[in-house]
């Protein structure tokens, strides 16, 4: 039976899926897997596109040039990439992809979430896409391990959760990270003003320990990347993350990434393990992508024992709340330390907290910069360095406002002076 007879009069909503399945099978019969393995990703795509075009020309249905191009792209995307998600990944305006089962796909563009017409043909196709992602980083997801974090080869972070935990079907969230911004670019985007950026640059150069806090999607990782870009090139930097997101430009960077347990429940390497190991690697700076457990105490101890200038992020609702959050996380270590001892560690280790927030219009900006001025085991006291004062909402709920600076506390001014940051020595610079 001729191929065009096999696909005669399909239902319109299944026609593309049926065609893709037929030609996917034909392609599998034609390709030489060993030969493809020796080609680069770009060469593989070109080779498969040419083979498919030839097959369609030989006995394919009558298609317009646009329909043929879309069919070829779909089949090749399924073979080499992430299928129906490939066009979304190719769209640079998309910063997050949220798959809520095979029929519901949402994306974030410019801080706004919107539904898109992209669909998976079935739950099985979605599971195949998930398996392709997690297997590429030697991880697994199944009923016994229904949650997993992974990373695409191009750097996007992926979170997957499947039934029985996800009641409406497999759910996948892909967060992509734009080309790392430098601090000047964030100033240009309105994330902070020049004076605050100059102060934070001085704090990083002066080796102050800085914590970046904020809620989910507030831009903590982006801002941490910008801060890390201010570290001198001649320093050895060790980065520690659950899923590698940071992209440092310096020449002497060691990147560490945690690892979950294998099928037998063994082989896990936690953030805490990596922080402890980093201390044996002669780092000038330690950057922890996000503290979320007992490793917080190890990080604080590192900051208190000669590893000045370290950076970290933490989930919190304000700069002051970040201190309480660090205290809670540090108490999760097995050391069973009293609260006063943990507070002593935080007061001694943390110098500056930068808090970011996401506006109703999707904008992300620094909303407060606070210096920690409390000592030893005393209650936390903070001194404001800068804050964003919002104005009335504009058209379409756009956020406007201005940045306000405050005077530096004496101890911070002295540390900047000793580090040679003379622009911030005079009392009236920010006052």
Image (cartoon, rainbow, N blue to C red):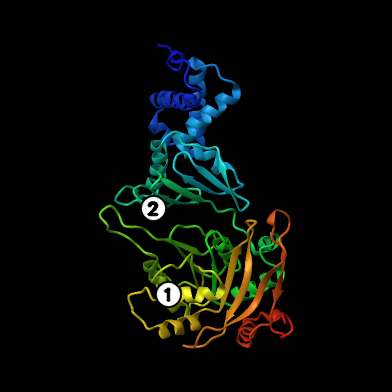
User: Measured from the top left, where is residue 148 in percent x and y?
Assistant: 38, 53
Tag nearer the camera, 1 or 2? 1
State the residue at coordinates (63%, 86%).
414
**Towards the viewer: 234 or 134:** 134
In the visual, does 399 lie left or right of 251?
right
Secondary-structure class at tag 2: strand
Residue designated by label 1: 328
Splitting the image into 4 quarters, where does residue 318 fall?
Answer: bottom right
User: In which quadrant of the rendered image does the C terminus lie?
Assistant: bottom right
Label annotation for residue 355:
none
Query: Which element is circle 1 on?
Result: helix
For label 1, count other residues whose C-alpha is less than 10 Å away and answer few (under 14), some (14-19) or many (20+).
some
Which quarter of the figure has residue 267? bottom left
Indicate whether 61 appears above or below 388. above
When the figure is inspected, residue 143 is found, relative to residue 288, above or below; the finding is: above
Residue found 51% across the figure and 64% down from its top: 252
Residue at 55 percent across and 24 percent down: it is 68
Residue 114 in the image, given as x and y percentages of width and height:
58, 46
Picture residue at 63% right of the left edge, 67% below the top: 366
The quadrant of the rendering that contains the N terminus is top left
- Left or right of residue 396, residue 217 in this image: left
Please report whichever mark, 1 or 2, sits nearer to the chain's N-terminal start. 2
| Residues at marks 1 and 2 touching, judged by CB atoms closer than 8 Å | no
Foreground residue, 44 or 98?
Answer: 98
The circle drawn on residue 148 is: 2
């Amino acid at each position: 039976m001729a191929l065009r007879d096999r696909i005669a009069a399909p239902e319109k909503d299944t026609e593309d899926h049926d065609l893709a399945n037929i030609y996917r099978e034909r392609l599998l019969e034609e390709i030489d897997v060993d030969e493809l393995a020796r080609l680069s990703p770009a060469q593989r795509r070109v080779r498969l596109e040419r083979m498919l075009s030839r097959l369609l020309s030989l006995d394919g249905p009558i298609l317009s040039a646009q329909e043929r191009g879309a069919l070829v792209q779909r089949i090749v995307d399924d073979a080499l990439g992430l299928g129906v998600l490939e066009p979304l990944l190719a769209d640079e305006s998309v910063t997050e992809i949220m798959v809520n089962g095979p029929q519901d796909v949402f994306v974030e563009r410019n801080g706004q979430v919107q539904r898109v017409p992209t669909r998976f043909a079935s739950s099985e196709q979605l599971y195949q896409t998930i398996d392709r992602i997690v297997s590429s980083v030697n991880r697994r997801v199944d009923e016994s391990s229904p949650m997993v974090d992974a990373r695409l080869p191009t750097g996007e972070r992926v979170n997957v959760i499947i039934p029985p935990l996800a009641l409406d079907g497999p759910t996948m969230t892909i967060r992509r990270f734009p080309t790392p911004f430098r601090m000047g670019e964030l100033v240009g985007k309105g994330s902070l003003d020049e004076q605050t950026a100059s102060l934070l640059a001085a704090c990083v150069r002066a080796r102050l320990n800085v914590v970046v806090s904020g809620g989910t999607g507030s831009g903590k990782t982006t801002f941490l990347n910008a801060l890390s870009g201010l570290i001198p090139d001649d320093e050895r930097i060790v980065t520690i993350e659950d899923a590698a997101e940071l992209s440092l430009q310096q020449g002497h960077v060691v990147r560490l990434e945690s690892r979950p347990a294998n099928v037998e429940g063994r082989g896990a390497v936690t953030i805490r393990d990596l922080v402890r190991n980093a201390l044996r690697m002669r780092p000038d700076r330690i950057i922890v992508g996000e503290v979320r457990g007992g490793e917080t105490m190890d990080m604080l101890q590192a900051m208190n024992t000669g590893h000045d200038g370290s950076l970290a992020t933490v989930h919190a609702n304000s700069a002051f709340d970040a201190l309480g959050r660090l205290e809670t996380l540090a108490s999760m270590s097995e050391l069973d330390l009293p609260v006063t001892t943990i507070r002593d560690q935080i007061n001694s280790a943390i110098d500056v907290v930068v808090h970011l927030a996401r506006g109703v219009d999707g904008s992300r900006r620094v909303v407060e910069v606070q210096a920690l001025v409390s000592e030893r085991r005393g209650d936390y006291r903070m001194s404001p360095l800068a804050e964003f004062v919002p104005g009335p909402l504009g058209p379409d709920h756009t956020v406007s406002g201005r940045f306000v600076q405050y005077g530096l506390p004496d101890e911070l001014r002295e540390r900047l002076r000793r580090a040679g940051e003379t622009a911030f020595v005079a009392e009236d610079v920010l006052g």
